[in-house]
Image (tube, grey):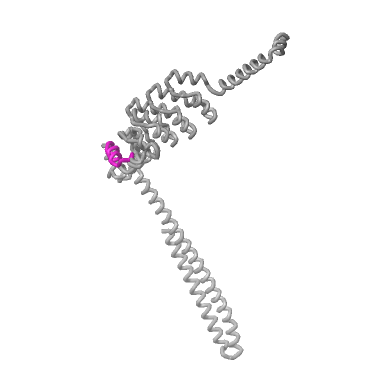
């Protein structure tokens, strides 16, 4: 160490050379840390056109170089023409570069026309473009839940369908998805069953359901093309017509009971009014009877009624009471004889 310091003091140029070497090492270390040379070497020997400046620019734009270079190498080896600018633009837009490249390679192998711009648009729309290409090559089967329809005779028919679809690349952006297909098939099943006169017609010919649905062109405006609709299961459900009639009869019964209860309440109220009216009339009779002795006394005072007239009046009242008593005993005897018989 002392000899090195002595050499530096005797030869100032040696110190400058040493500082330059140290600076070069630091710059080279930073360069190798900033630019992935290993990735550039891999791309170079794979035939992918990526420069060191492009890799440095990706770092500056906060783009991970491996997410761009690896798909580019894959596309280059598959013979798909694509540039780093296209991949980087799609990456910065929030797309999945790897899935787009896989979709382009799969489409090229399957002879499906699919450009990078269209694939990128499909990916940015939120759809899996690689899965769409796969469904275009290998159709997908969508199974509907159990859908119930009611025939004209009131019998419920439950059906389950399997819909074979193929992805329509041209309508993936803006086209409806599987939920719309299931909803439209369900609508077709309900319409077909509802137009049948009896449920037996549907059970004897379940193909009529699929034929009716296919004629409607239910795949319009969707991201799929319906290839076939197969009825997987048909079963008889409840007797909806009978249930509705029973419910209607129960409702009519409750209405009739309510009206009868209303009439009974009116009759009870009227009876109470009549009882009150009778009590009122009896009160008037009692009041009138109370006026009779007063009138007799007043007639005595005024000389309008004599003693003999008074006795005749008493005899008439006694005779009337006796006749009422006899009539009451006879009615009671008649009632007792009827009960004995």
Q: Is residue 293 visible?
A: yes
Closest to the observer: 210 or 341? 210
Q: Which residues are magenta?
A: 206-219
Which of the 4 image quarters holds residue 218? top left
Location of the C terminus (image quadrant): bottom left
Number of marks drawn: 0
Q: Give the residue drawn at x 57%, y 88%.
A: 306
Closest to the observer: 29 or 211? 29
State the predominant SS element of the stretch in magenta. helix
Which of the 4 image quarters holds residue 2? top right
Q: Give the residue drawn at x 42%, y 35%.
A: 121
Residue 178 on image: x %, y %: 39, 36
Closest to the observer: 129 or 167? 129
Q: Is residue 160 visible?
A: no
Residue 38 on image: x %, y %: 51, 18
Residue 325 on image: x %, y %: 50, 71
Q: Say if 193 sits above or below 57 in the image.
A: below
Location of the N terminus (image quadrant): top right
Residue 83 on image: x %, y %: 43, 28
Which of the 4 image quarters holds residue 311? bottom right
Report whether 307 appears left or right of 240. Answer: right
Q: Say if 265 sits above or below 14 in the image.
A: below
Q: Residue furthest bottom?
A: 303
Q: Give the residue drawn at x 68%, y 15%.
A: 12
Q: Say if 320 sits above or below 265 in the image.
A: below
Q: Is residue 269 magenta?
A: no
Report whether 296 appears left or right of 163. Answer: right
């Amino acid at each position: 160490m002392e000899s090195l310091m002595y050499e530096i003091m005797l030869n100032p140029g040696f110190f400058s050379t040493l500082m330059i070497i140290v600076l070069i090492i630091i710059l080279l270390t930073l360069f190798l840390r900033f630019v992935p040379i290993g990735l550039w070497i891999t791309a170079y020997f794979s035939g992918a056109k990526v420069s060191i400046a492009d890799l440095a620019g990706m770092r500056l734009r906060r783009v991970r170089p491996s997410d761009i270079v690896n798909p580019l190498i894959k596309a280059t080896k598959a013979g798909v023409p694509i540039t780093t600018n296209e991949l980087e633009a799609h990456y910065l837009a929030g797309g999945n570069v790897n899935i787009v490249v896989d979709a382009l390679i799969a489409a090229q192998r399957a002879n499906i026309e699919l450009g990078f711009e269209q694939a990128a648009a499909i990916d940015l729309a939120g759809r899996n473009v690689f899965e769409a290409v796969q469904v275009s090559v290998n159709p997908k089967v969508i199974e509907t839940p159990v859908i119930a329809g009611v025939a004209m005779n009131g019998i419920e028919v439950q059906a389950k369908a399997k819909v074979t679809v193929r992805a329509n690349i041209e309508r993936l952006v803006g086209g409806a998805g599987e939920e719309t297909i299931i909803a439209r098939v369900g609508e077709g099943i309900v319409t077909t069953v509802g137009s049948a006169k009896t449920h037996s017609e549907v059970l004897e010919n379940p193909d009529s359901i699929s034929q009716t649905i296919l004629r409607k062109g239910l795949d319009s405006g969707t991201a799929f093309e319906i290839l076939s609709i197969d009825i997987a299961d048909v079963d008889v459900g409840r007797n909806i017509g009978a249930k509705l009639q029973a419910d209607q009869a129960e409702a009519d019964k409750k209405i009739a009971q309510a009206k009868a209860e209303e009439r009974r309440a009116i009759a009870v109220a009227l009876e109470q009014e009549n009882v009150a009216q009778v009590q009122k009339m009896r009160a008037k009779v009692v009041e009138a009877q109370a006026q009779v002795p007063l009138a007799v006394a007043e007639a005595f005072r005024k000389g309008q009624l004599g003693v003999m007239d008074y006795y005749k009046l008493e005899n008439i009242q006694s005779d009337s009471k006796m006749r009422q008593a006899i009539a009451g005993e006879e009615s009671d005897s008649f009632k007792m004889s009827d009960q004995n018989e």
